Image: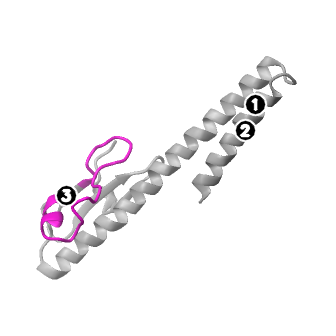
């Protein structure tokens, strides 16, 4: 909902720019356009982070359910899809970079890393590779 509101604000601001163009000096228009671009970039970043966190929730739940049921950890995301713990259409890649989310089976647990715009989130993130 916040993303939609942000997009509506950006659209209204762009419409405002076209009407207000004759009333502002050119440098003011440039300043407003720059601010709008920055806000739009922030909305895009937050949208990617939202998707990453939604994916992470589903993936972590599937890995833990698999471990609970099978008394072992899956080797990779494909095992979870094949075993029916993940929908075959479930995204296992970062929405921005296309890289597969980091997962590594450990002795008793697993390392799972989702790289947000300003943090790392997942399981045992102290073992996540540095980006």
SS type, badge 3? strand
Q: Judge depth for marks 2 and 3 and give the one in front.
A: 2
Q: In this view, does 30 lie above or below 112?
A: above
Q: Residue 12's spot in the image, x, y percent?
A: 72, 42
**Residue 121 among those drawn in magenta:** no
Q: Disc number at residue 13? A: 2
Residue 126: quadrant of the picture = bottom left
Please provide the residue range marked out in magenta: 76-102
Residue 60: quadrant of the picture = bottom left
Q: Disc number at residue 104? A: 3
Closest to the observer: 73 or 100? 100
Q: In this view, does 82 lie above or below 119?
A: below
Label whose residue precedes the other's in the sequence (2 or 3)? 2
Q: In this view, does 130 lie above or below 75?
A: above
Side of 114 where 32 appears, left or right: right
Closest to the observer: 8 or 110? 8
Name the quadrant of the C terminus: top left
Name the residue beneath numbered marker 1. 17
Q: Residue 66's spot in the image, x, y percent?
A: 18, 74
Give the class, few, some or many, for how many residues have Cα within 10 Å of label 2's Cα (few <14, many ≥20): some
Task: Identify the residue at horizontal 35%, vertical 60% (top origin).
Answer: 55
**Residue 77 among those drawn in magenta:** yes
On the question of residue 76 being in view, the answer is: no
Side of 89 where 13 appears, left or right: right
User: Which residue ends up furthest to the bottom in the rendered image?
Assistant: 69
Label whose residue precedes the other's in the sequence (1 or 3)? 1
Measured in 3D between alpha carbons, the distance from the residue under mark 1 to the one under mark 3, in whole angstroms, is 50 Å
């Amino acid at each position: 909902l916040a993303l939609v509101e942000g997009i509506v604000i950006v659209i209204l601001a762009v419409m405002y720019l076209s009407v207000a163009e004759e009333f502002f000096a050119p440098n003011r228009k440039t300043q407003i356009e720059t601010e709008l671009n920055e806000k739009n970039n922030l909305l895009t970043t937050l949208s990617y982070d939202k998707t990453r966190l939604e994916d992470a929730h589903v993936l972590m739940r599937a890995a833990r359910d698999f471990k609970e049921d099978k008394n072992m950890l899956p080797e990779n995301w494909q095992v979870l899809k094949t075993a029916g713990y993940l929908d075959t259409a479930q995204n296992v890649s970062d929405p921005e970079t296309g890289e597969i989310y980091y997962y590594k089976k450990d002795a008793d647990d697993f390392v799972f890393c989702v790289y947000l715009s300003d943090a790392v989130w997942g399981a045992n993130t102290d073992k996540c590779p540095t980006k």
